[in-house]
């Protein structure tokens, strides 16, 4: 199968994933509405927490309110896409390992990483995109974005989301050996919490560890630093390099994990 036809095939499969996930979500309407309110509440809580801080200070480590809020709204916007595309799959992966449902995923004529981590979509997070995009645009204007900066935002968001996803995929591979994935998922969520603050607030040692060994701080800090000062393009090179390295680590751990996987249904 050619690369073009393979892409079409995977897009066709993903469209089915989206439609089935939407149908399932809409069949439980009360839960669907509650999930929308929960996401909106999380968004408002994160925004107003930082807004409250800047009611008392003018700058944090050289960043003023508009610069810090640009970082926050960038991360909240990326988090919306993460919630829509990936969030449910990590919990389902844990359940499938314990129940033996992973057997059917492995047998599908698809890449198993794609089948595991892209199978479930969360449509209830879509409404949160409206305030996320609106507030990000407000602070981008407040920071005087040029046309080039605006055009760079979508690819940078994709790069940030890709790096976050690959790091989370690597962390999730531990479930093959531990089987019980609740602890791994909470650890993964704590890594997300670290990334929601810019690297400038962390100490030197913490910043080095979480920028190079587990590059979770690069997810938001690298693109936002670049957008605020386009001479800092080296941040993006480090970010791209980290994404490539972790992708190869993921492939190795995934193959090792499948080899040790012992079906619960057998």
Image: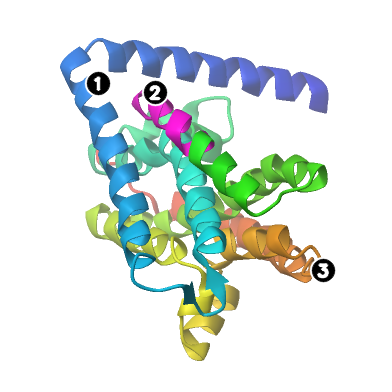
Question: Left or right of 44: which side holds 169?
Answer: right
Magenta segment: 122-133
Which secondary structure lies at badge 3? loop
Judge by depth and name the residue closer to the eye, 240 or 227.
227
Which secondary structure lies at badge 2? helix
Select label 2 or label 3 by which is in front: 3
Residue 192 in the image, given as x and y percentages of width and height: 41, 58
Q: Give me the C-alpha separation between circle 3 and circle 1.
A: 44 Å
Q: Give me the C-alpha separation between circle 2 and circle 3.
A: 38 Å
Residue 173 in the image, given as x and y percentages of width and height: 43, 56
Pointer 3: residues within 10 angstroms few (<14), some, or many (20+)?
few
Q: Are marks 1 and 2 in contact (CB under 8 Å)?
A: yes
Q: Which residue is mark 1?
A: 32
- Residue drawn at 54 percent across, 50 percent down: 74
Residue 100 in the image, given as x and y percentages of width and height: 29, 36
Does the segment drawn in magenta span residue 128? yes
Q: Which residue is mark 3?
A: 231
> Which sits earlier in the primary sequence, circle 1 or circle 2?
1
Q: Quadrant of the C terminus?
A: top left
Judge by depth and name the residue closer to the eye, 55 or 118.
55
Q: Which residue is mark 2?
A: 123
Which secondary structure lies at badge 1? helix
State whether residue 233 appears in this view: yes
Pointer 2: residues within 10 angstroms few (<14), some, or many (20+)?
many
State whether residue 120 appears in this view: no
């Amino acid at each position: 199968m050619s690369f073009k036809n393979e892409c079409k095939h995977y897009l066709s499969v993903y469209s089915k994933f989206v439609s089935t996930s939407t149908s399932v979500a809409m069949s439980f309407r009360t839960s669907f509405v509650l999930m929308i309110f929960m996401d909106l509440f999380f968004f408002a809580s994160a925004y107003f927490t930082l807004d409250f801080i800047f009611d008392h200070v003018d700058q944090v480590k050289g960043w003023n309110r508009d610069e810090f809020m640009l970082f926050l709204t960038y991360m909240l916007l990326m988090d919306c896409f993460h919630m829509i595309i990936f969030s449910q799959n990590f919990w389902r992966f844990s359940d499938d390992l314990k129940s033996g449902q992973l057997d059917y995923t492995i047998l599908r004529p698809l890449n198993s990483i794609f089948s595991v981590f892209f199978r479930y979509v969360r449509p209830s997070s879509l409404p949160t995109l409206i305030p996320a995009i609106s507030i990000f645009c407000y602070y981008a204007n407040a920071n005087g974005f040029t046309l080039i900066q605006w055009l760079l935002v979508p690819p940078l968001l994709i790069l940030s989301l890709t790096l976050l996803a690959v790091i989370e995929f690597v962390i999730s591979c531990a479930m093959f050996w531990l089987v019980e994935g609740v602890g791994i998922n909470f650890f993964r969520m704590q890594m997300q919490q670290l990334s929601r603050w810019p690297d400038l607030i962390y100490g030197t040692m913490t910043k080095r560890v979480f920028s190079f060994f587990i590059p979770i701080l690069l997810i938001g800090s690298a693109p936002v630093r670049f957008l605020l000062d386009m001479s800092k393009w080296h941040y993006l090179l480090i970010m791209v390099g980290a994404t490539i390295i972790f992708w190869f680590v993921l492939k190795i751990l995934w193959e090792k994990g499948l080899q040790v996987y012992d079906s619960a249904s057998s």
